[in-house]
Image (spheres, rainbow, N blue to C red):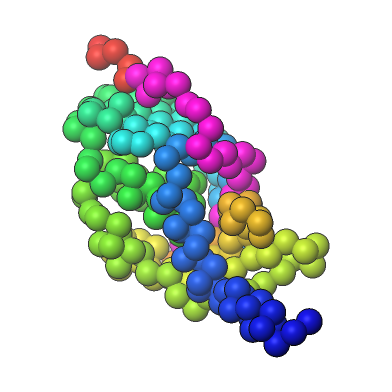
Amino acid sequence: MGPIVIVSLLLQVRTPQETFAKIEETIQAANRLTVTFSGNVASPVDPNSSIKINGTLLVKNPGKARLDVTIEGAGKNGQKTYCSDGVQLSLTRNDASGARPLTKATPTHLRNRLDVVLARVGIPLSVLFAEEAQLFTGPDHSVTELREAIIASEFKAIDDGKGNPGISYKLQVVRGKWKSLSCILWYDERTLRPLKRIVRLSDELKADCEETYNTWDVDTEIPDTRFTLPPEK
């Protein structure tokens, strides 16, 4: 192997931070995303507090998105559906809260919020611990503002011993109850698509979240009928 080839190969090797940034870029570049996930949030000191959250996220430019989630455990049983047709956004629930459906204009930066959630935090924590409906209907921040509010740092490359690469990183949340999170993101080395995420919450919350991405399809066709808002009651 000649020196030019060696130098070329070395230049292709990314640092963990560069790999993480590339994963974020890959998520942002997708025109359509279909993600099915299963997650479990549990406290190591209270096994009865375990919460399971499963669902599907559909994203289609411009401004269309749908998240269907089922939550079980710790008195949070129920289903939620967030849906945006690109103009209007709705939140409907089937749980014990008795909350009425919510409808509002689709935020301009909805896709930015979903991209940051998928890359940095994961879906279960965003649904369970963010302020009510924050995932879809919070302040309309740009992607830069969102990244400054949820800061990723201290990137390290890790391996699970089976050849699957991962990145450990810290999240500093500027506002909200999380404050500090320790995370590991496992990903497909060839496509950079996320496979699994483990998040250890701050000491105040005393819980860990494990999320597996069962499906992560990029730019496969999604019928527009999947983004039809439910009729108003």
From the viewer's side, name the closer residue of 225 and 94. 225
Answer above or below: position of 103 versus 197. Answer: above
State yes or no: residue 222 in magenta: yes
Say whether residue 135 is visible: yes
Judge whether 112 appears above or below 80 on screen.
below
Q: Which x, y percent locates residue 15?
A: 56, 77
Q: How many marks?
A: 0
* Residue 39 position by quadrant: top right
* Residue situated in front as seen by the camera: 72 or 231: 231
State the residue lying farthest toward the bottom. 3
Q: Which residue lies at the image location 63% right of the left edge and 78% below the top edge? A: 8
Asked whether 24 or 131 is in front, the reply is 24
Q: Is residue 45 visible?
A: no
Most extreme residue toward the left is: 105
Q: Does the magenta portion include 227?
A: yes
Question: In the image, what residue occupies the spot 78% across and 82% down?
Answer: 1
Of the pair 64 and 180, the residue shown nearer to us: 64
| Residue at the spot 53% in from the left edge and 40% down from the top edge | 218
- Quarter of the C terminus within the rendering: top left
Q: Is residue 34 above or below residue 127?
A: above
Specify whether 119 is left or right of 216: left
Relative horizontal placement of residue 166, taking residue 114 as reference (left or right): right
Residue 123 horizontal/vertical position (percent): 47, 47
Q: Which region shows up in magenta?
A: 205-228
- Residue 53 percent location from the top left of the image: 54, 40
